[in-house]
Amino acid sequence: MNFIYHGIEHTLQDTWMMFPFLLVTYLILEVFERKQKNTDEKVFFGLQKYGPLIGAVVGLIPQCGFSILAAMLFVQRNITMGTLIAVMIATSDEAIPILLSEPNLYSTLGMILILKFVIAGGVGMLVDRVLFPGQKIITFEQMEEVEEEDWEEESPSSTCPCCYVQYPIPVSAFLRSLKIYGFIFVTSLVLTWILEGIGEEQLSMILLSNSIFQPILASLFGFIPNCAATVVLTSLYVGGQLQFGSLLAGLITNAGLGLVVLFRYQEHKRNILWVILILWITAIIAGMLFYGWGCL
């Protein structure tokens, strides 16, 4: 029973700050969706041209809620795939606070932030300009028109799969935030139980300490959509059990719960596979390039 209660307590500690963040975010989104002005639209949808660069900057902020926000905006077709991937690559979540707590690792933190920004922006631009050029995004004004036209014929394939346009803005934002948070909490709780059951020593063995294949395994481990995965990777690096390149690879694929949101709400599953594949290839290449590069 203590194991169960500890998992719940740990999950609450990791996720409770997400709800107010989600609520504020959805309040802003609701205002954009229902009452947007042309000036607001120009500012927000300037992201279409320079989205990956801005996404890379936003992703560097140590708050996994941004990957969730980016995922929902992508589901609603408000941002491009390149912008989504840039946010996910740049996201470092709990790694920043952990590295900040170790003064001798400030050089590592600085290099992580620089590399993740450059890689996120570069890969994001490559995705939008080369792999998937000509992507079209839907403005909030267009979303509003679609909602009005389909009011009497509401279907699951709506532009926004989790909107509550029949309610006032505060109520709709609260319901959307609660729905996402509930899904996040349950997922995080299950993953926390799994990670605590395995243990850090076993994870170190699984990740093949000092092996050239370590970045590949670390990148796979990074796909675990939980803040604990970032904590484990960073802790193993601090303890000398993980190479710098492996840490970088794991942090590139660890997009928080953004991928979970995509699996839940993205209708076109092929897009999810593309996102995962691009993240993984990027992580492996970066991890191999910087394997053994010491910042400790």
Image: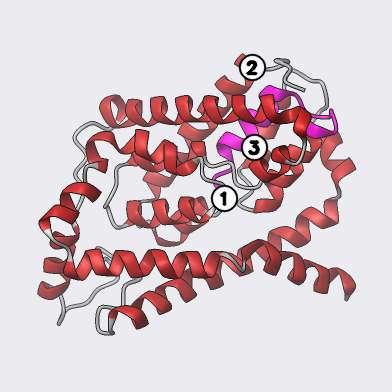
Q: Quadrant of the N terminus?
A: bottom right
**Which residue is at a point 17% across and 71% down the rendered structure image?**
147
Residue 186: where, in percent of width, then height?
Answer: 62, 69
Residue named by callout 3: 220
Magenta run includes residue 253: yes
Disc 3 residue type (three-letter):
Leu
Left or right: residue 169 compared with residue 71: left
Question: Which amino acid, by three-letter code, is at mark 2?
Answer: Phe
Left or right: 222, with 276 as reference point = right
The reply to whether dot 3 and dot 1 touch (C-beta < 8 Å) is no
Indicate the position of residue 154 as horizontal and vertical percent values: 22, 77
Mark 2 or 3: the one toward you: 2
Residue 293 to residue 267: above or below = above
Magenta residues, start to end: 238-255
Which residue in the structure is indicated by mark 1?
256
Say what secondary structure mark 1 lies in: loop
**How much space separates mark 1 and mark 2, taking CA atoms?**
23 Å
What residue lies at 10% left-to-right and 73% top-to-bottom?
Answer: 149
